[in-house]
Amino acid sequence: MTPELAALAATAVIHLAAVLWSQRALEADVGREGNTGPRDDIADRLSPHTLRLRRALANHVENTGLFVIAVVLVQFTGSNGWVTGLAAWIFVAARALYLPAYAFGWVPWRSVIFMAGLVACFAMILASIF
């Protein structure tokens, strides 16, 4: 397995952890019935922490798509190397740090961490093109 694919697998584990963390916070706020129901009227019952976790999860989903594209491009073009491997693991580290940074309001570190992951993705994409 290439470092980029291993990083993609690690990102899947981070994704699962993010979902579980967000859902646990949601259930703490609205109870099991609120969590398993349609959730139409729960927004006013969610704590600021739970709302931040839900936004962090949404951000993670959005950025994982870009990372998947970067990994696929690197794999299909055969442009794997130390730069793409390092960039892939920088992305993983950034995503692992971004979730608590968002959840606990680490300002300005949340933005710095986000940019590190984004730049890593673009480095992979550029490496696959050039």
Image (spheres, grey):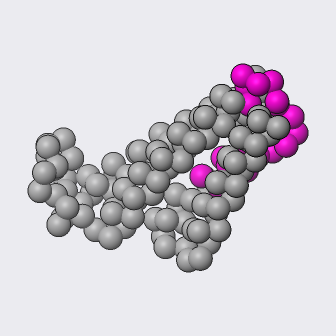
Horizontal side of residue 80 vs 124, given as left or right: right
Residue 115 found in image quarter:
bottom right
Residue lying furthest bottom: 107
State whether residue 93 appears in this view. no
Q: Is residue 93 magenta?
A: yes
Give me the residue at 60% from left, 61% from top.
114
Give me the residue at 69% from left, 59% from top.
116
- Residue 86 in percent (x, y) is at 81, 45
Quarter of the image for the C terminus: give it.
top right
User: Foreground residue, 114 or 92?
Assistant: 114
- Residue 110 in percent (x, y) is at 57, 68
- Residue 2 in percent (x, y) is at 77, 27
Q: Is residue 50 above or below residue 83?
A: below
Residue 48 found in image quarter:
bottom left
- Residue 89 in percent (x, y) is at 73, 45
Q: Is residue 55 above or below residue 67?
A: below
State whether residue 64 appears in this view. yes
Residue 5 found in image quarter:
top right
Magenta span dominant secondary structure: helix
Residue lying furthest right: 82
Instruction: Report the magenta residues as a range.
Output: 74-96
User: Foreground residue, 112 or 77?
Assistant: 77
User: Foreground residue, 126 or 37?
Assistant: 126
Give me the residue at 80% from left, 24% from top.
78
Give me the residue at 65% from left, 28% from top.
72
Q: Is residue 122 above or below residue 13?
A: below
Quarter of the image for the N terminus: give it.
top right
Q: Is residue 23 magenta?
A: no
Horizontal side of residue 37 vs 2, given as left or right: left
Residue lying furthest front: 130
